[in-house]
Amino acid sequence: MIFSTVAQTSTAATMLSLNPTKPLSLFHSQLQSSSPFLKHNQQQPPPIRLLHLRNLKPTTLLVAAAASSSNNQVYQPFRPPTSSVPSQFSSLGTDGRLEVLQNRLGLWFEYAPLIPSLFQEGFSPSSIEEVTGISGVEQNRIVVAAKVRDSLVQSNFDPEILSFFDNGGAELLYEIRLLSAAQRASAATYIVLNRLDPQGTQELARAMKDFPRRRGDQGWESFTYASPADCLSFMYFRQSREHRELSEGRKSALERALEVAETENAKRRILDELEAKSGRGEVKEGDVAVRTKVPVVRLKIGEVSEATSVVILPVCEAGEGETGVVEAPGECRSKGEFGVMEAEKGWRRWVVLPGWEPVVGLGKGVVVAFGDARVLPWKVNRWYKEEAILVVADREKKEVEAEDGFYLVSSVPDDHGGLKVERGSALKELGVKQCLGNVVLVVRPPKEEIDDQLQDDDWE
């Protein structure tokens, strides 16, 4: 920083520019007394150097930074780029553009760019809706869909297939907005060839977007990411595992997956699953002698938000023992036009799960949170011990019936009265005929990278 001092005279002023080499300090240890006008025992300020003298006009004061002298650019405020209006509408004024939108003059993707141009002139979605009758939702849809269509044009997409979206195609193209350029092209082709409606298109886009995140799921490697049909098929294949064994819902989902599958590997994997389900009643030589009847599900990130239906269940800690299970509310149902959830009594902890078949319709369901997965009778003991789990139990079924079933019971006194899961055969050997509830589902926490999906034969 340059400090300028100005002395005013009748004709001119002299400015001394000082630039000390060290910080100014009256107590600097290395200062030397060099002035005859100062006493030897008095501390002195650091020496100053006379840099230059200049003549200034009277009453002028300068305080400037060195960098400011070299920057002579004028500040330019940010202005958003002008929107690209189609050539046939470029000569129209504001009233003319509003008239085009009001009367839908042209194809939807031709007049869609007029909406952003009106935004730049100060219009809001509500004011445009007032004049043209196009709702804010529809304005957003056609503007976004037009950009998706432009990306298809730039990728040299087949014009004949693209013409399918000329009339009423905004709803379809809007659904594939989150896909990459390459995915949009393959998805658009699949939409046209299979004549998908907006709901079907939404499912397709969701399946294609979700497929990479499902790496590690059982059967994932048999489906091809580059094929929209395989992505959709895998979504149905994965949904089939949310149903009980040998149920119609599971069989129906697998048949739907087989119907849309494209590659041979995917079809073979689905057929193997169908054949395994149909022959599950007979145990062949070399097969696992005992199969679990309790689904073990890895909850996926975002799965609850994407579910079409959800279930809300009360949660108690395993350490609370039998008291927590007994005192938990029995029912939580939606009532009224808004679906307000009501429980029979207040409770501190709840969990929201997708509407999987094992938990839908549980009259007195309860969820027990275990911090250690070793409470389950695993057939193998690998990485489960450090993973928290949720065990869903049906409190209406307290009879210990099936030897290969799993039941929620109180631990022995050495385990501090907590809860654990036991196989029916072990309970029968101890003469136990009643339990706290029949285990219907085990939920594992979501993870970003999954390479340890539980197999059906991992139970004892």
Image (cartoon, rainbow, N blue to C red):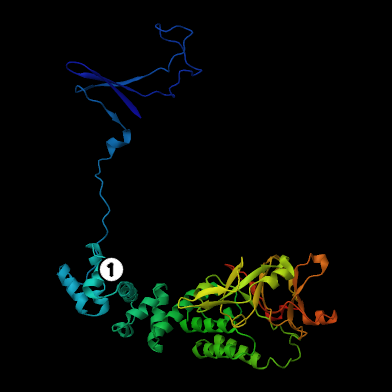
In which quadrant is the C terminus drawn?
Answer: bottom right
Q: Residue at x 19, y 23 (%)?
A: 57
**Nearer-the-camera pick, 17 or 243:** 243
Rendered location of residue 294, percent (x, y): 68, 81
**Nearer-the-camera pick, 311 or 279:** 311
Figure quadrant of residue 396: bottom right
Rendered location of residue 445, percent (x, y): 62, 69
Q: Is residue 143 above or below residue 50?
A: below
Q: Is residue 196 above or below residue 373?
A: below
Figure quadrant of residue 92: bottom left
Residue type pointed to by label 1 = Pro
Rendered location of residue 397, percent (x, y): 70, 83
Q: Residue at x 45, y 18 (%)?
A: 26
Q: Viewed as shown, does residue 190 lie left or right of 309?
A: left
**What residue is pinned by disc 1?**
125
Within 10 Å of the Cα at label 1, are there few (<14), some (14-19), or many (20+) other Cα atoms?
Answer: some
The residue lying furthest to the right in this view is 430
Q: Residue at x 61, y 66 (%)?
A: 349
Count numbered badges in the picture.
Answer: 1
Q: Residue at x 59, y 70 (%)?
A: 351
In which quadrant is the N terminus drawn?
Answer: top left
Rendered location of residue 49, percent (x, y): 36, 19
**Nearer-the-camera pick, 430 or 238:** 430
Q: Viewed as shown, does residue 355 lie left or right of 150?
A: right
The residue lying furthest to the front in this view is 345
Mark 1 secondary-structure assignment: helix
**Nearer-the-camera pick, 291 or 160:** 291
Figure quadrant of residue 280: bottom right
* Residue 374 appears in the rendering: no
* Residue 409 appears in the rendering: yes
